[in-house]
Image (cartoon, rainbow, N blue to C red):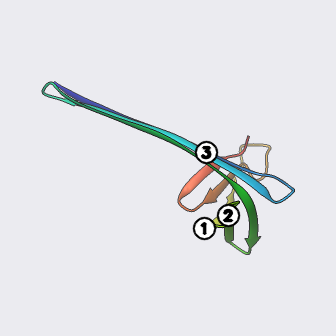
């Protein structure tokens, strides 16, 4: 037989003092006709954030900067507003 699985988890914390923490972990496992491949990794970044319209700029403490399209997204069925935040291709759920 064959099989595969992918697991990805990302978190982004934007603090009121203008700092952020972003972390992620991923795992990939695949088997095909007795052959296996397993890959995994994790990352973490810290720095300062700023927002200009729909552009979220994340600048790591080492000076490396990234800009992402960002906007709130809301589900009318939940009492939290906004309950999600879209940042650079990833939809984060508010915790």
Sequence-first tag of 3 and 1: 3
Q: Which residue appears at 68% of the width and 65% of the height? A: 59
| Marks 2 and 3, how far apart at CA | 13 Å
- Say what secondary structure mark 2 lies in: strand
Residue shown at 67%/55% (left/top)? 85
CB contact under 8 Å: marks 2 and 3: no
Q: Residue furthest bottom?
A: 53
Give me the C-alpha separation between circle 3 and circle 1: 16 Å
Q: Quadrant of residue 40?
A: top left
| 28 lies left or right of 2 | right
Cα distance, mark 1 to mark 2? 8 Å
- Residue in the image at 62% along x and 58% along y: 86
Q: Residue at x 71, y 60 (%)?
A: 61
Mark 3 residue element: strand
Q: Position of residue 8 (x, y in %)?
A: 48, 40
Q: Tell me: 45 left or right of 33.
A: right
Single out the mark in the foreground, 3 or 1: 3
Q: Counting residues from the N terminus, which is met first, the one under dot 2 or under dot 3?
A: 3
Q: Which residue is mark 1?
A: 68
- Label 3 close to label 1 by CB (< 8 Å): no
Which residue sits furthest right?
Answer: 17
- Mark 1 vs mark 2, foreground winner is 2
Residue 44 seen by the camera: yes
Q: Which residue is mark 3?
A: 23
Few, some or many C-alpha atoms within 10 Å of disc 3 (few <14, some 14-19, many ≥20)?
A: some
Where residue 13 appears, x then y in whole percent? 72, 48
Residue that numbered label 2 is attached to: 58
Q: Residues within 10 Å of mark 2 (few under 14, many from 20)?
A: many
């Amino acid at each position: 037989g064959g099989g595969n699985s992918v697991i990805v988890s990302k978190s982004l914390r934007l603090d009121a003092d203008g700092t952020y923490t972003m972390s992620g972990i991923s795992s990939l496992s695949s088997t095909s006709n007795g052959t296996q491949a397993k890959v995994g990794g994790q990352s973490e970044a810290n720095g300062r954030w700023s927002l200009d319209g729909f552009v979220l700029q994340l600048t790591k403490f080492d000076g490396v900067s990234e800009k992402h399209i960002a906007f709130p997204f809301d589900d009318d069925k939940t009492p939290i507003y906004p309950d999600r935040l879209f940042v650079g291709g990833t939809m984060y759920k508010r915790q």
